[in-house]
Image: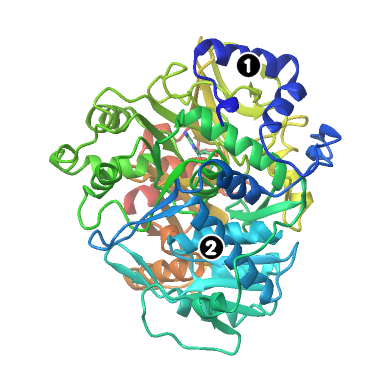
Amino acid sequence: MEGLSYRSIADYTKAKEQASAQPEVFWENIANQFEWYEKWDKVLEYDFHTPKVSWFLGGKLNITENCLDRHLKTQPDKTAIIFEPNDPNDAAQHISYSELHSRVCRAANMLKANGAKKGDRICIYMPMTPELAIAVLACARIGAIHSVVFAGFSATALAARINDAECSILLTADGGFRGAKVTPLKDIADEALTSCPSINNCIVLKRTGQDVSWNNMDLWWHEELEKVNDNCPAEVMDSEDPLFILYTSGSTGKPKGMVHSCGGYMVYTAYSFQNVFQYQKGDVYWCTADIGWITGHSYIVYGPLAVGATTVMFEGVPSYPDYGRFWEVCAKHKVNQFYTAPTAIRALQKHPVELVNKHDLSSLKVLGSVGEPINAEAWHWYDKHVGKHNCPIVDTWWQTETGGILITSLAGVTPQKPTYATLPMPGVQVVLLDNEGNEIEGETEGILAIKHPWPSIARTIWGDHERYKNVYFSAYPGYYFPGDGALRDAEGNFRITGRVDDVVIVSGHNLGTAPIENALNAHESVVESAVVGFPHDVKGNALHAFVIPNAKVESNKLTDELRALVSKTIGPIAKPDRIQVVSGLPKTRSGKIMRRILRKLASGEYDQLGDVSTLLNPEIIEEIKRNS
Ligand code: PRX
């Protein structure tokens, strides 16, 4: 989509100027690059107080028409998806746009034949095979709302997400390959479905071939596909109809089902994909994320396919069969744009550089980073050993809630600065606030906030608009509040300093501490717990849990049980690295846990505890230090 691209700093500057002078004209010009059944009556309506945001009002479209059908006219044989399996000895698959179109339509008919219709919620709990992307697109084709749950989540977490959205169908697989491990997805799904009354059908992809138990509502994917054809006209969707729900951790209580809508999400993901990565015709682009996270939704599936790109889907992990796998895959598929997370870079950096050097990385043009701040050491290693000082690095800041990348450099077009995400995309108005909510100018540090909507902002939290208002629009009225702090340099570049709430980013995954505390507190021997993050050299942050037991317990046994409990309740990614049994937690006189102090204690920054004399129980500090 050439019309979307800024190829020079002059184009970029012009776009920025137009976006701030006439935001609606700016976005309308971008939206005009897509195929709509009917154009909108109005570009934007919003009120950050209510809050309500609508884009391209009255516009009618189907995102799959833009991601698939449109390309059949110009490039039917171009590879849409390159699938690289977990086992390097298995053949990669190249799926053309016409084959993808046919497979999506057939899968869409399979869903329809099993009762799915526009507006229904369909849960997808699948490994990273092409059928996962096909499932997502098949839902979009018929206007069903997909809710992808990362295939590393536990049965309890899966059930909670299915129930929150009242999904009617579950799409899963017998199992999933990830490195040397095989995850028994069907067994986990079976356990979840014992408490999910809304599910009518469970359609199971055969991936690993392992034995599975079979229930009344279970159907084999391949058998269901045989019953239908591949003719499936796209459902006409309103621009503001929900496209998908994706759950993300909150700082309190249950996960938040962020709702993204069809029109704005399509426009923004394609626009940002094109400009950030500077994708050119014929390039091969690879984002190593899982489709279970927003990065996979926006920058493996929708953004790349909307612009007609070739996107790589990788089933495996960076360490299997060895720590050179990423680079082997880059060389094998002649990858041009490579997008990964700092946690992966830090893990790979610990292994001999020979594992990078032995692969031919000369195809690489652009490197990307996402999910957490990239530290200087990782940035320079990435630049030197992977990019050979020859590839711009885009450090992309965004969130599940934002739908697309908001702060970043544009590869080779705007300047980069190590550890800085740099500048907002044209059309995105980022400001820094002080604690009272006043905008602060110039070179300074503050709370990141956004003062005008962009098309892919999440529209609500599924079933809980009040929470959407409270979390994102109440702390600083009139602004969208993402929950991050940032520094700004004299040139206006932003460096994200981290969360300002009780969310910890572990290996690039957003984990609320409250749900982990709830899981710990569910153990019969636990009275109270507090979980905080501490710096970790590979994961960025890791979790430290402070736990008060109700009686004398054997601490090793308890900590093993607690790890298992968190793994079962949420998933292995949420297991604390450290669990410390304590007799009390530092509290204010009103009984509030002083997390700031716990964070310092967990990080070993004993000299930065500040004044602890006002605590209800200052003596607890010494005990925690002694036993840490
Ligand atoms: O704290 C920021 C961090 O990840 C959070 C969003 O997490 P999630 O919704 O899981 O989405 C991750 C993938 C987009 C943000 O609030 N974060 C994300 N990207 C960066 C980042 N922190 C610093 N630099 C980044 N590039």
The residue at the point 76 percent across, 58 percent down is 463
Residue 92: x, y in percent?
32, 57
In the rendered view of the protein, which quadrant contains the N terminus? top right
Q: Is 28 left or right of 566, judged from the image as shown? A: right
Q: Nearer the viewer, residue 330 or 77?
A: 77
Residue for badge 2: 103
Q: Is 496 left or right of 180, judged from the image as shown? A: right
Q: Is residue 33 visible?
A: yes
Residue for badge 1: 16
**Residue type indicated by callout 1:** Lys
Q: Nearer the viewer, residue 515 or 70?
A: 70
Distance from the alpha carbon under mark 2 to that under mark 1: 40 Å
Helix or strand or loop: what does disc 2 sit on? helix
The residue at the point 40 percent across, 34 percent down is 368
Mark 2 vs mark 1: in front: 2
Q: Are marks 2 and 1 in contact (CB under 8 Å)?
A: no
Q: Quadrant of residue 474?
A: top right
Disc 1 packing (10 Å; few <14; some 14–19; many ≥20): some
**Residue type indicated by callout 2:** Arg
The residue at the point 47 percent across, 64 percent down is 151
Q: Nearer the viewer, residue 481 or 167?
A: 167
Determine whether 465 is above or below 415 in the image. Answer: below
Helix or strand or loop: what does disc 1 sit on? helix
Q: Quadrant of residue 354?
A: top left
